[in-house]
Amino acid sequence: MTTGEYITIFAAILVGLAVADIALSFHRLLRAGRKVKWDWLSPIIALIVLCYILNLWWGLYHDYSNVEQVLFGWFLLDVATLLALFLMSAAVLPDSIPDKGIDLREFYMANRKHFWITYMVYLVFVIAKNSQLIARLELDSATWAEANVPLIVLIGFSIVLILSRRVWLHLLMIAAQIYTIAGVWLFYSIQ
């Protein structure tokens, strides 16, 4: 096996854990039945996180599919990104359903700081990965800005969401997430 294949297997394990966490949490919500007061924020964001997981998986597969040698720092940055993504997936839905039940809107609002902080950490690692790749390929600052300025804007907006309970602001971020995911998928489909 090549180095890239070993790394892809390692990444698959972490990606699988993140997907399993979302699926298991959603399963618990479904099993709780009437104990759950449903709201759309957490499930939609869980779906967005699932898209980020799939995007990262295909990106890593693309990056490592034909690699024979990897710098340890590059690998550590990928591991950090995967761990941040796992923490996002673990934060988006409740781990358990109390006997008294759960209101998903209250859960989201009470948990929003934890989720959006892990999201910002994830974006910082993505920016670092982009920056490392752009430097390695000796691309210009316009390419760096094109790759990273939207992510920096998302970090700034995440700070607003940590501080605000206004649902319309959270809806704007969901729209920005869908736009970002669509752009990334379009980018990968072109290559």
Image (spheres, rainbow, N blue to C red):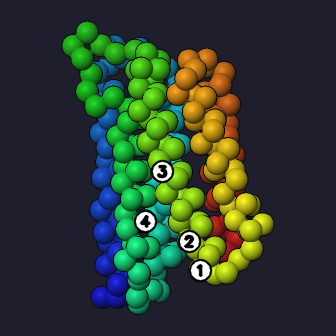
Labelled disc at residue 24: none
Residue at (69%, 65%) from the top-left corner? Answer: 144
Disc 1, SS? helix
Image quadrant where residue 132 sits: bottom right
The residue that appears at 30% across and 39% down in the rendered structure is 24
Residue type at tag 4: Leu
Position in image of residue 77 (x %, y %): 43, 65
Name the secondary structure under disc 4.
Answer: helix
- Image quadrant in which the N terminus is located: bottom left
* Whether label 4 touches label 2, CB < 8 Å: yes
Residue type marked 1? Arg
Cα distance in 3D space between marks 4 and 2: 10 Å
Mark 3 or mark 1, which has the lower sequence index?
Answer: 3
* 103 lies above or below 141: above
Q: Secondary structure at mark 2?
A: helix
Residue under label 3, please give it.
122
Residue 31: x percent and y percent? 28, 26
Between the residue at mark 3 and the residue at mark 1, the CA separation in whole angstroms equals: 21 Å
Q: Of circles 2 and 3, which is in front?
A: 2
Q: Which mark is residue 136?
A: 1
